[in-house]
Image (tube, helix red, strand yellow):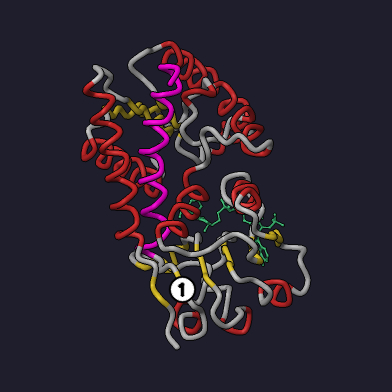
Amino acid sequence: MTARILEGKEFSARIKDEAREAVEQLRADGVIPGLTVIIVGENPASQVYVRNKHKTCEELGIRSEVVALPEDATKDQLLETIDRLNADQNVHGILVQLPLPTAIKAHEQEILERIDPLKDVDGFHPFNVGKLVTGSPTLVPCTPAGCIKMLDLAGIEIDGKRAVIIGRSNIVGKPMLHLLMARHATVTVCHSHTKPLGDVTREADILVAAMGKPKFVTAEMVKPGAVIVDVGINRIAPKKLVGDVDFESVKEIAGAITPVPGGVGLLTVAMLMQNVVRAARLQLGR
Ligand code: NDP
């Protein structure tokens, strides 16, 4: 048996179509949704991500602005920039591209908390995290939200399933736990102290790998027929990206699997566009 390949391109196109329609409605009401991305320094991967976000905004009719601060920008400069954007009515979404340069990395939480929760399109502000945990999700982190949306669009049942997540980060693992639990899956979260990992992952009907370890999940760790969502993005050579899952071996045993590249990464940007629309509506009180 070879797994169904869940192509990010197909699902992201559908998510973007929904966003495009919502943008058109807002524009018809005289509102042009706007996203501002703040990038600090010159991390090449971050620059690629920011360019993709900008391009996708333009494609959908969202006003896009990139504020580039130098590598040696101070925490206060960044906070002042956020304050200015918080007060700007034309800016509906604010996103600080991570990772921050080493010199200000320690202030990451303070910086993210400075963003107006209604403009927090990454969904990382404690207000939005709290809304998610207490069952009234508002602005939800884009990558896990995109994974759930993809499962829905693919017609994959979540209710009553055993879901296992490898990784407990604030960006992927933890929000994924709450999203899957809200959809009535029985969820286990694994991390670097989970032993033996394979015993847990083999129980999964839905396995989400978000650990940042190239090709770590092998066929022996997967239950036959399981749905595999590979969030990992690992650069193993200048032009070679792989996921956290050993795609070639796992696709022979899984029921469905996302490829890397061309899987979850595309959904993340598409969901960001939906979050900008949602943020604009929230600010309009809709
Ligand atoms: P983090 O480094 O923040 O978290 C990694 C998690 O994996 C940690 O919880 C860690 O456990 C766990 N882990 C690491 N090694 C093992 C192991 N051997 N066994 C079990 N658990 C392990 O990563 P992120 O969540 O930010 O990102 C994860 C991956 O997803 C990365 O490859 C990243 O590039 C990718 N990513 C992709 C996105 C997309 O758009 N597709 C968006 C965001 C991330 P512990 O907590 O114990 O340290």
Label 1 lies in ligand 1 vicinity (Cβ under 8 Å): no
Q: Residue at x 28, y 52 (%)?
A: 13
Position of 105 with respect to 84 (left or right) is right
Q: Residue at x 69, y 59 (%)?
A: 187
Do we see residue 191 in this rendering? no
Please rate how many residues cluster around mark 1, counting C-alpha atoms within 10 Å: few if below 14, some from 14 to 19, many from 20.
Answer: many
- Using the image, determine if residue 56 lies above or below residue 192: above
Percent across and percent down for residue 5 are: 38, 73
Where does label 1 land, which residue?
Answer: 256
Percent across and percent down for residue 217 are: 58, 74
- Using the image, determine if residue 1 lies above or below residue 125: below
Given residues 52 and 240, the one toward you in this image is 52
Q: Which region is colored magenta?
A: 261-286
Percent across and percent down for residue 200 are: 72, 72
Q: Please, what is the dominant secondary structure of the magenta stretch?
A: helix
Do we see residue 205 in this rendering? yes
Q: Name the amino acid type tagged 1.
A: Ala
Quadrant including the C terminus: top left
Position of 210 with respect to 83 (left or right) is right
Element assignment for label 1: strand
Given residues 56 and 140, the one toward you in this image is 140
Quadrant assignment for ligand 1: bottom right
- Using the image, determine if residue 241 lies above or below residue 116: below
Q: Residue at x 43, y 27 (%)?
A: 279
Q: How many marks?
A: 1
